[in-house]
Image: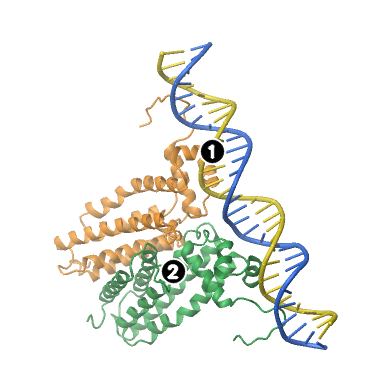
Chain colours: A green, B orange, C blue, D yellow
Amino acid sequence: MTAKPARGRPRAYDPEEALAAALGEFRRRGYTATSLDHLSDATKMARPSLYAAFGNKLEIYRKAVRQYSEQTAERRQRALFEEPSLDKGLEDYFGAIIDAYFSREGEPLGCPVLSVISGEAAADPVIGAELAAAIGRSDGLLQRRMAQAVEAGEIAADADVRGLAAMLAALQHSLALRARAGTPRPELQAIARAHVALALRAAGAARPN
Amino acid sequence: MTAKPARGRPRAYDPEEALAAALGEFRRRGYTATSLDHLSDATKMARPSLYAAFGNKLEIYRKAVRQYSEQTAERRQRALFEEPSLDKGLEDYFGAIIDAYFSREGEPLGCPVLSVISGEAAADPVIGAELAAAIGRSDGLLQRRMAQAVEAGEIAADADVRGLAAMLAALQHSLALRARAGTPRPELQAIARAHVALALRAAGAARPN
DNA sequence: TTAATTTTTTGCGAAGTGGTACAAAATGAC
DNA sequence: GTCATTTTGTACCACTTCGCAAAAAATTAA
């Protein structure tokens, strides 16, 4: 990956680290409240270097989120689609989400999208679309999983697939928000467990366990 | 109410209108992205007048939210606690919430608290506390209602009161977020209906209808 | 009229905003 | 070495940010 001798002056930063540091700033401060000076400090890159490397503020944010998504998506999707037990799969899915909602230092930062650009989404159509897309992706995943569950007989044949998916998506939205408000991790985990259990019961799960 | 001859120069603005206009700006733009100039324009008050009347930016926001809350709380609480049918009560409760999440002109602005200060909550402890308090208030209301429902035999005696309340709160959080992403009203209403129906089914409602 | 009181208006200031131009520095290719 | 190339660092731009001081205006009380 990093095997590129290149030609000119070697860059003094690691793009991946820089984007991670930038995302940290966005998550802590929120989108608008994060200035280019903040990003410059956090990445240890001068502002012109930031521009040359990633583009303007919005582009920096998008690239940082994309990297985060790619890094965390696999575990979530595997939990959802490769775990045989629906119950355990959902618990792992939300467990992965909760893990991602905390920084390495344990700060409850919530979701880099839902929690960070919600404030700006109504005024800026580009950001609004970004938010809508993120929500739509989760909805899609959960709908697919619930449809599978119906086919596999894991839940009632006449279960409301879309309603159940929306109800589980709501848990994700709620976790993002509660993390943002400082709710400690064990409490989030308890909330997720209870929510999943109730959802499965409402779905007429084959084995209410 | 407005019967106060006062002494000095009469104020040229109506405080209630001004706060409503200020809240509109906050809701549209988000907290940080709303500048005092925006507020000054929207309220038609010069910046020093804003300061004299309401205080600094955060105080303006708080007073505007307080007014909004007082104006919308009654309908919500009546739906929740005075409607005999639990099912209908919850539907009306979330119906009132959805109504409040749209501006008079029909823009889906979401919640003036959840959708607006989520981004700032992690960095600013005062705002974080504000967000946590708002979440806690809804949790409390829903817990009380679900506890009543158990006592009245409207739902199963061994129902998970806290879990159900959190699950319904999650619907509120999700509605706020989806509104922010531009989801049209009928879709929000459908989501709310399905969510409530599933929650009641999970609660072992006496009459699943 | 005059004085007291309250609000509005004008204008300022120091700091921060996103974004960029341009020269200096560090490398590989020749 | 010398050149082409790429990144870095310094400095700057025009604009906006929040906040306030001080004067002007509009009213009631005496």
Q: Is residue A23 above or below residue D12?
A: below
Q: Is residue A30 left or right of residue D23?
A: left
- Report the quarter where the N terminus of chain B lies: top left
Camera-side residue of A51 and B61: A51
Residue drawn at 26 percent across, 59 percent down: B142
Give the amino acid at mark 1. Ala
Where does label 1 land, which residue?
B46
- Give coordinates of residue A15: x percent, y percent: 59, 76
- Can residue B44 be seen by looking at this rendering? no
Circle 1 Cα neighbour tier, 10 Å, few/some/many (<14 / 14–19 / ≥20): few
Q: Quadrant of residue A89?
A: bottom left
Residue drawn at 37 percent across, 44 percent down: B67
- Report the quarter where the C terminus of chain B lies: bottom left
- For disc 1, the chain is B
Mark 1 secondary-structure assignment: loop
Q: Is residue A148 above or below residue A37?
A: below
Camera-side residue of B14 and A154: B14
- Can residue B46 be seen by looking at this rendering? yes
Where does label 2 land, which residue?
A111
- Give coordinates of residue B3: x percent, y percent: 37, 28
- For disc 2, the chain is A
- Give coordinates of residue A80: x percent, y percent: 38, 82
Q: Are marks 2 and 1 in contact (CB under 8 Å)?
A: no
Q: CA distance from mark 2 to mark 1?
A: 37 Å
